[in-house]
Image: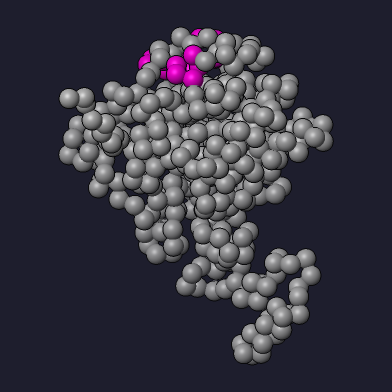
Amino acid sequence: MANKSRLHIPRPTARPGDEPDFSYLHLSPAGSVDRPPVDTRTRDMEDLSHQLVRVLDDDHRAQGPWNPDIDAAGLQVALRWMLLNRVFDDRMWQIQRQGRISFYMQAAGEEAVSIGQGMALRPGDMCFPSYRNQGLYLYRGVSLVDMMCQCLSNTRDMCKGRQLPVMYHSRSANVFSISGNLGTQYPHAVGWAMAAAIKGEDHIAASWIGDGSTAEADFHHALTFAAVYQAPVILNVVNNQWAISTFQGFAGGERRSFAARGLGLGIPGIRVDGNDLLAIYAVTQWAADRARGGGGPTLIELVTYRAGAHSTSDDPSKYRPKDEYSAFPLGDPIERLKQHLITAGHWSGKKHSMLEKDLKAEVLAAWKEAQQHGTMTEGPFLDPATMFDDVFAETPAHLESQRQRMLEVES
């Protein structure tokens, strides 16, 4: 009798109580992956979609052709931004647990993604982020106070109380609004890049989604448009191994890498160590140069790990081993860059401790200032009448009437 077909249910390699098991990850030795010219045809560099670009080796030394040779001062600046991101996240997590804000999402373990890629892009490039890219906002000049006020929905909230906490935006920094509808930023980025090409600009777009969002239709629509019109865009998939509580295999990660998703459309894919700031910077710079030179889109998979919960509404101990992050073979991005600088003689444990202390003081001062603009329980409070603003170019009569009636009731 012939074998019957069976429905395959993806399963993670470890569950709560099990030993962490990352044997499914394909890791390449640091420095072992070739760096092709930016004008190489997609068919001639398909290997980049299943190998892993790494620069920092296990001894924290930079190796191979992807080494971007960033000077010590530049790496120290990068370390500061990454550490600020983590200190900010820790403070905001505590604040949510105290009931001062309603919701928060950390980028713990993924800080190198936003900072490494932010460094490789130009200020005129447009970014379409996801909700773990707060480091990108910080790097591009959005203040700690403004980001805190958005989470507080207070009188200084950039979104005027209309968005969930962590859904930031910044027109001046060229960072688009974060969308709670996962994946929608991908088509937006491709469309913006197409417009830049039509106008003859050399600006490019970049967007980020998680591994789970690759299962959304928006992901595939964006890849198709980017490929057909050769849009100057970098499409990033941050593979942190878990969606909300779903292992990356449910989005198709068991069969081929996420970086390989665009090969059938002629889009080159590069798989990179998402906890290696030097590798991230080098790969992003390569993709940006390719896009600016008319080479079209690149799909980058950043292999990392979500160190904490998906959000303050999540308990990861229910679906994965409690100590899984400590066993992740690519380590911690901040610790790796710190040790690289120490090994090269440009940093020390004492300097790192002093920097961390200074950043904690900076974040605390920002929080004290943010509270002056109101909290969920303490004034000043956002004027309810602002709900009628920014809806229409000219407020129609029926809304103006509603505004007046609300003011009359309040008075």
Q: Is residue 370 visible?
A: no
Quadrant of residue 18 within the rendered picture: top left
Q: In this rendering, is residue 278 above or below 389?
A: above
Front residue (pair 80, 278): 278
Check the image and report above or below for 43 versus 196. Answer: above
Magenta stretch, main secondary structure, is: loop
The picture quadrant where one finds residue 19 is top left
Residue sitting at 73 percent across and 22 percent down?
294
Instruction: Please count the marks in the image.
Output: 0
Q: Residue furthest front?
A: 1
Vertical placement of residue 373 versus 283, above or below: below
Would you say 49 lies left or right of 403 here?
Answer: left
Q: Is residue 216 visible?
A: yes
Residue 122 percent across, percent down from the top left: 69, 32
Find the magenta span and give its range: 47-67
Instruction: Point out residue 93 in the picture as x, y percentages from the top left corner.
Output: 41, 53
> In the picture shown, does residue 138 fall above or below 166?
above
Q: Nearer the viewer, residue 386 or 251?
A: 251
Residue farthest toward the right in the current orientation of the protein? 199
> Which residue corresponds to the image point at 76% horizontal and 36% vertical from the top-left?
196
Q: Quadrant of residue 224?
A: top right
Q: Quadrant of the C terminus?
A: bottom right
